[in-house]
Image (cartoon, rainbow, N blue to C red):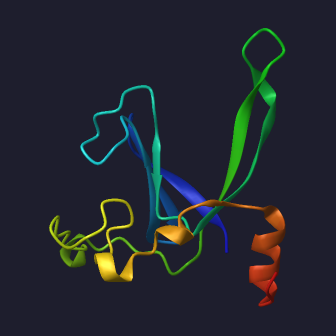
Amino acid sequence: MEITFKMNSKKSIMIMEGENYIGRIFTPSGTSQDIPNAIQVCGFDDCFSLWGCGVFDDGHGNPKKDIQLLFNKNSQMDLANRIKFDLSNGCGKCFSPKDKCKCADLRVKELKEIIIDKVGGKI
């Protein structure tokens, strides 16, 4: 799979796999797009390997951070079938019903976890 980027506007980039939208990068971030000086990336399956960036720093030798995001073909953008979030019964972080909360999956993984998942093993 090879991903590409399609500029939607100066503040929005669609992440593509062929002709399919599999993700989006936009700013300002947040559900209400109300967090300035931040970007939001949607549609990825996992994030892993939070490192110090070897290219960017603060001008005093302190590295900025670098993170890798993993996308898969099964991501799709279908606004007609969006999850209807119910504030009374839904989790405010993973948007699943509270009794089926998936927040344990919302974490930065170690690179070895991604590799083992890819080959179908377990840690």
Q: Residue at x 30, y 75 (%)?
A: 98
Of residues 29 and 18, the one drawn nearer to the viewer in this rendering: 29
Of all residues shown, which one is farthest toward the top? Answer: 60
Quadrant, the N terminus: bottom right
Left or right of residue 62, residue 7 in this image: left
Residue 66: x and y in percent read 72, 40
Residue 57: x and y in percent read 76, 20
Q: Residue at x 79, y 86 (%)?
A: 122
Left or right of residue 27, residue 104 in this image: right
Of residues 60 and 86, the one drawn nearer to the viewer in this rendering: 86
Left or right of residue 16, residue 108 in this image: right
Above/below status of 30 relative to 95 = above
Q: Residue at x 80, y 63 (%)?
A: 111
Q: State which quadrant residue 2 falls in.
A: bottom right
Of residues 13 and 63, the one drawn nearer to the viewer in this rendering: 63
Residue 14: x and y in percent read 44, 55
